[in-house]
Amino acid sequence: MPMTPRPRRVLLLGGTSEIGRAILSSLDAPPDTEVILAGRDERRMAELGGALPFRVRTVHYDGTALESHQPFVDAVFAGGPVDLVISAAGILTPQEVLDRDPLQAGLLMETNLTGQVTTLLAVTRHLRAQRSGVIVVLSSVAAVRPRKANFVYGAAKAGLDAFARGLADSLHGSGVRLLLVRPGFVIGRMTAGLPPAPAATTTAAVGAAVAAALATSAPVVWVPRGLGVLSTAMRLVPRPLWRRLSR
Ligand SMILES: NC(=O)c1ccc[n+]([C@@H]2O[C@H](COP(=O)([O-])OP(=O)(O)OC[C@H]3O[C@@H](n4cnc5c(N)ncnc54)[C@H](OP(=O)(O)O)[C@@H]3O)[C@@H](O)[C@H]2O)c1
C-alpha cells in the first residue's frame, strides 16, 4: 500500500538523529508540513529544525521513560492526525563498555528496543483509529546475525526487527503501513571513530532510499540495496568462520 504521497504532519522520534533528518530532507512534502522533532535536547532540535524546509516544532521525548510514552503519543495526536512517524532513537555503545558495565547494556536494550515497542504500540492505536499513516522503523544489518563485536546492539536490533515485521503483518488491511529500514554501516555521528565497514553508506543515501521506498509499497528497504543479497550470504557462513570474520 503506497503512503499518502505528500505527508502533512510528521513525527520524528529521536529529533536530532542524522538519519532521521536526512529522511525528512528527502521527503516530497509541502513547506507547510508540520514536523514534530521529539527528543531529549530541545535546544539542539530547535537549532537543527531551522535547517529543515518545513514548519518545525520540538517536544520532549525520552525513549527510556516508558511510562511517559502513552501520554506523550496521545498529546501529539491530540494536535491532529499524523501521516508519518519515523522511529530513529538509538544508541551504539561499544561492546567493551557493555562488557564492563551490564547496566549500560540494559540502557541500550531499553533505548533501542523496549522504548520503541512502548512508543510504537501507542502510535499504532492512533494510526489504526485514523485508518491511515506510515511508520518507519530503523533496524540494521546488525539484526541479521549477531557479531561478537556488538552482540548487545545486534540483539536489540534483532528484537526490534522481529517486532516491526510482526506489527507490519498485524496492520495488513488496516490502512496503516510499516516500512522497515535496514541500513548497513552509516558514516556519521553514531559511528564516529569506527573504521567504516565494507559497503558503508551515508545518511543522505539512507534518506533518499527511504523517501523512494515510501512512494512504493515495499515493506523493507536495505541501504545500500545490495546488502539484502549479502545478508542472505551472511546467514550461511559457518559459525567457526563467522566467529573469525566478524569483528
Ligand atoms: N549510523 C549507523 O551506522 C546506523 C546503521 C543502522 C541503523 N542505524 C539506526 O538508525 C537510527 C538513527 O541513527 P543515526 O545514525 O541517525 O544516529 P544519531 O544521529 O546518533 O541519532 C540517534 C538519535 O537517538 C536519540 N536518542 C538516544 N537515546 C535516546 C533516548 N533515551 N530518548 C530519546 N532519544 C534518544 C539521539 O538523541 P540525543 O541527541 O538526545 O542523543 C538521536 O536523536 C538508530 O536507531 C540507529 O541504531 C544506524
Image (spheres, rainbow, N blue to C red):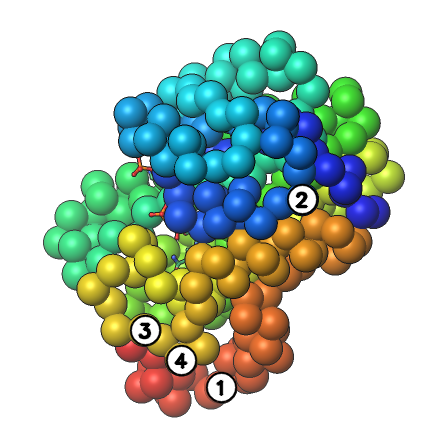
Give the left or right position of residue 131, taking residue 28 as reference.
Answer: right
Mark 1 vs 4, N-terminal side: 4
Q: Position of residue 105 (x, y in %)?
A: 27, 47
Q: Which structural element holds mark 2?
A: loop
Residues at circles 2 and 4 in contact by the CB criterion of under 8 Å: no
- Disc 3: residue Cβ within 8 A of ligand 1's nearest atom: no
Residues at circles 1 and 4 in contact by the CB criterion of under 8 Å: no
State the separation of the CA atoms marked 1 and 3: 21 Å
Which residue type does callout 2 highlight? Asp
Residue extending farthest to the left is 100
Label 3 environment density (alpha carbons within 10 Å; few <14, some 14–19, many ≥20):
few
**Where is mark 3, residue-wise?**
196
Q: Observer-nearest residue: 27 or 118?
A: 27
Q: Which structural element holds mark 1?
A: loop
**Circle number at residue 198:** 4
Mark 1 vs 3, N-terminal side: 3
Q: Position of residue 48 (x, y in %)?
A: 37, 35
**Circle number at residue 28:** 2
**Where is mark 1, residue-wise?**
237
Q: Which structural element holds mark 3?
A: loop
Residue at the (42%, 37%) spot, across then down: 51
Q: Observer-nearest residue: 76 or 155?
A: 76
Quarter of the image for residue 113 reads top left
Residue at the (33%, 31%) spot, across then down: 47
Which residue type does callout 1 highlight? Val
Q: Position of residue 17 (x, y in %)?
A: 40, 43
State the separation of the CA atoms marked 1 and 4: 17 Å
